[in-house]
């Protein structure tokens, strides 16, 4: 196999690669505000990097990412009121997961893993996987479909080393230390640390309310402080995610 990036392959190369029965990894991101210091594509860049790290170990292909995701919720993404946040209704996301699964199955794939980079996608991708499995399992013997958020695999020792605790409120980490550090490691050209303003964490309540209180969301879109982010921490996060996700996928698709 010359590459693991599906988008860079010719169709005969892709066809030949599929004969080795690889698991197809599909990053599922979002186009969403990530504060004044990070680009709108953070939730695409980060899961794609984790997928590529896993795929570099062999046995995987990385499909082109889904660049749009489910709506930004105030509690975990700041909400839909920010310019740039460009979201899908749940039915659209579910349909994309179903359509992609059908196509990969038609190509001959029997292992498909959706690697989510945006919290709000998780349940909708689950629904897409469930419907896709129901529709395709009879056609494709041995079919397995997996859904996971890449950040859900932070080993305890990495969490303690960086945060000083293993109790992390991932919703509040939107545009925070983890995402900012990984972007500093992977794409420092897209990070503007000088634009960060230290402020109190988000005061959005734990329930979801329509309409939500815009004033409870920090006006810059950063839900918690990102000032302690560094490229070194970003490399620690990425290495840890690649290692633990590769182990989990190895178990799920053995
Ligand atoms: Zn994000």
Image: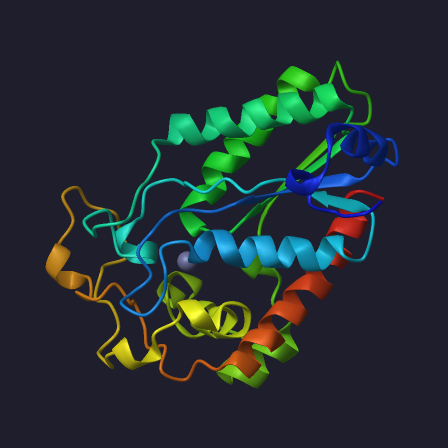
**Residue 212 visible (yes or no):** yes
**Residue 196 visible (yes or no):** no
Q: Residue at left 54%, top 36%?
A: 126
Instruction: Please give left or right for residue 231 compared with residue 106 in the image.
Output: left
Coloring scheme used: rainbow
Q: Quadrant of residue 42?
A: bottom left
Q: For the C terminus, which image quadrant?
A: top right
* Residue 183 coordinates in the image, percent (x, y): 48, 68
Q: Residue at left 59%, top 72%?
A: 237
Q: How many marks?
A: 0
* Residue 41 coordinates in the image, percent (x, y): 41, 54
Q: Residue at left 73%, top 65%?
A: 243
* Residue 133 coordinates in the image, percent (x, y): 65, 24
Instruction: Please give left or right for residue 21 compared with residue 225 in the image.
Output: right
Q: Residue at left 36%, top 60%?
A: 39
Ligand 1 location (quadrant)? bottom left
The relative height of residue 53 versus residue 168 in the rendered view (above or below) is: above
* Residue 249 coordinates in the image, percent (x, y): 74, 50
The relative height of residue 29 versus residue 144 in the rendered view (above or below) is: below
Going by the picture, which residue comes out furthest to the right? Answer: 20
Q: Quadrant of residue 69?
A: top left
Q: For the N terminus, which image quadrant?
A: top right
The relative height of residue 151 versus residue 67 in the rendered view (above or below) is: below
Which of 67/210 is in front? Answer: 67
The relative height of residue 194 versus residue 21 in the rendered view (above or below) is: below
């Amino acid at each position: 196999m010359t590459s693991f990036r599906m988008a860079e392959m010719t169709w005969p190369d892709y066809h030949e690669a599929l004969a080795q029965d690889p698991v197809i990894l599909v990053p599922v991101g979002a186009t969403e505000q990530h504060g004044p210091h990070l680009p709108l594509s953070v939730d695409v860049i980060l899961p794609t990097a984790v997928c590529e790290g896993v795929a570099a170990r062999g046995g995987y292909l990385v499909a082109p990412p889904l660049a749009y995701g489910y709506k930004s919720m105030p509690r975990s993404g700041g909400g839909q009121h920010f310019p740039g946040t460009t979201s899908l209704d749940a039915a659209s996301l579910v349909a994309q997961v179903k359509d992609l699964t059908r196509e990969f199955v038609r190509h001959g794939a029997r292992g498909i893993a959706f690697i989510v980079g945006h919290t709000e996608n998780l349940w909708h991708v689950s629904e897409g996987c469930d419907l896709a499995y129901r529709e395709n399992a009879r056609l494709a013997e041995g079919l397995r479909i997996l859904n996971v958020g890449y950040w859900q695999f932070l080993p305890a020792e990495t969490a303690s080393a960086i945060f000083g605790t293993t109790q992390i409120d991932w919703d509040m980490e939107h545009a925070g230390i983890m995402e900012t550090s990984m972007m500093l490691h992977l794409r420092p050209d897209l990070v503007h640390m000088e634009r960060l303003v230290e402020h109190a964490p988000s005061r959005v309540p734990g329930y979801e309310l329509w309409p939500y209180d815009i004033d409870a969301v920090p006006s810059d879109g950063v839900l918690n402080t990102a000032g302690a982010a560094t490229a070194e921490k970003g490399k620690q996060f990425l290495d840890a995610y690649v290692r633990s996700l590769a182990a989990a996928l190895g178990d799920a698709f053995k």
